[in-house]
Amino acid sequence: MNACHTAPGGASAGRIRDRDYDLAVIGAGSAGFSAAITAANEGARVALIGHGTIGGTCVNVGCVPSKTLLRAAEAMHAAQSVARFPGVAGSARLTDWSALLAAKDELVARLRRQKYADLLPGYETIDYIDGQARFADGMLTVGGAPLRAGRIVIATGAAPALPDIPGIAGVPVLTSTSALELPEQPESLLIIGGGYIGCELAQLFARLGSKVTLVTRSRLLPETEPEVSAALTGYLRDEGISLWAGLGYREIQQTAAGVALTIDVAGRIERLTAKQVLVATGRTPNTDGLGLAESGIALDGQGAIIVDDHMRTSRAGVYAAGDVTNRDAFVYMAAHGARIAARNALHGDDATYDNRAMPWVVFTDPQVAGVGLTEATGRAAGHQVKTSIVNLDRVPRALAARDTRGLIKLVADAHTEVLLGGQILAPEGADAIQTLVLAIKHGMTATALAETLFPYLTTVEGLKLAALGFNTDVARLSCCAE
């Protein structure tokens, strides 16, 4: 194909010659860049096909913008809650919504430039092509023109999905993207969905001063341990969030004052109102318009590309990675899967996707972090399990900080004592979880973890206490848990 193109950010990428590519990567987000750079570093000629804003979900509308605003709200809350220390007082308030969002946008633009657009000129064997990719007549095309490639990696990501609620098509809804671009702070906000996005945004907007109502069909973070879900539910309610769980959706309507959602809670009908509604009920893989099914690339019931442990699709020579697949929807797992896809596409299918020691984090406050199996999934996997739970009021770090919100739960095989998984609900849980990741990756037992040295007055020391808790009453231990 002969098409002149310019690399994002203004740097000329020259003219794409009529050539054969070793690898074509569809999608220029985290997974797409990971696959392209992996292949380029191994000497391959790569076509990286982007459509729309370069950088994908994480940097543009996901992790980066949401987490910087969450930190701002957390800083405000910290100032307001400092009175937990006797003799100390403080306060903070939001003074300029537009300035806060402008700072967020500047950070997003800078990282998009530094981590995506500006990288391309350093890779001479990557041609960036801006256009709509599609499989047609057994070939890969971009903007209707054929592109010849020996292997293909699909990494087109996902977009917010709408829930199946009667009337929702007629209601102006916010998504996790548009909610962070509002010209004015919402006076009141109804958030539908109790997953990690719903929980994070509920606390964010509530701390910044919006009146927030959060509704969810099941319970908060339904894939977490029930003890973690119940505790977080209480903490969010303590911050003034109106939280409704275990319900059915009857109807949503636009009203003169905003929106109204009718719910069914164990047979009792309730009508919830707010100025605006934000939908956070999951994401839909970006597979429409690619011609996948017609090309023999199988999709699951949610429209995601089905891949095996080598990131292969059902069509020979075509791989997929990231949120567009039926695998873990985390940016670092997207990049991990894309590296495996690229290597397998170029060199055979020896590399395997392994998520047994995959950490995950929900950036509420306290944070929720986990790795491995839960008590329920451990039993479902055939293990006879044993568990240990330590509340943060047993962790010296939490006592010194006068903030004992949270708990740590570990799951181990009852016969071998090998650790199977664990979750941390704590203000610093996101950083503490990596110790448990390494323990599970390397097959440590609960006893081995308990015998490991941990620094005193740290959150991560709670893992040692939880490991000791399998066989010991930690309330009867001295301060250093020995």
Image (cartoon, rainbow, N blue to C red):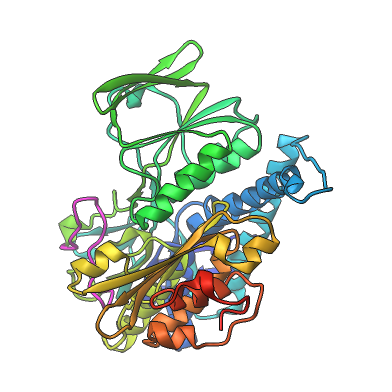
Q: Residue at x 39, y 46 (%)?
A: 220
Q: Is residue 53 visible?
A: yes
Residue at 63%, 68% (x, y): give it: 396
Q: Nearer the viewer, residue 448 or 3?
A: 448
Estimate the x, y position of residue 72 in percent, counting from the top left. 69, 48
Above or below, 112 against 90 in this view is below
**Magenta stretch encompasses residue 335:** no
Does residue 299 belong to the magenta stretch? yes
Residue closest to the eye, 455 or 357: 455
Query: At x 64% / y 81%, what residue is drawn?
Result: 455
Q: State the image coordinates of residue 87 (x, y, percent, origin top left).
A: 84, 48
Q: Residue at (30%, 82%) from the top-left corner?
A: 352
Question: 235 or 260: which is nearer to us?
Answer: 235
- Residue 370, by quadrant, is bottom left
**Is residue 358 shown above or below 286?**
below
Q: In which image quadrant can residue 297 be found?
A: bottom left
Q: Position of residue 218 (x, y in %)?
A: 31, 42
| Residue 3 appears anywhere in the view | no
Q: In which quadrant will I find the N terminus?
A: bottom left
**Looking at the magenta stretch, what is its main secondary structure?**
loop
Give the position of the C terminus as an image quadrant: bottom right
The total of numbered circles placed on residues is: 0
Q: Quadrant of residue 243?
A: top left
The furthest residue to the front: 476
Image location (x, y in percent) of residue 111: 64, 61
Residue 449 versus residue 81 in the image, above or below:
below
Is 238 placed left or right of 408 in the picture?
A: right
**Part of the protein shown in magenta:** 296-311
Q: As drawn, is 132 to the left or to the right of 209?
A: left
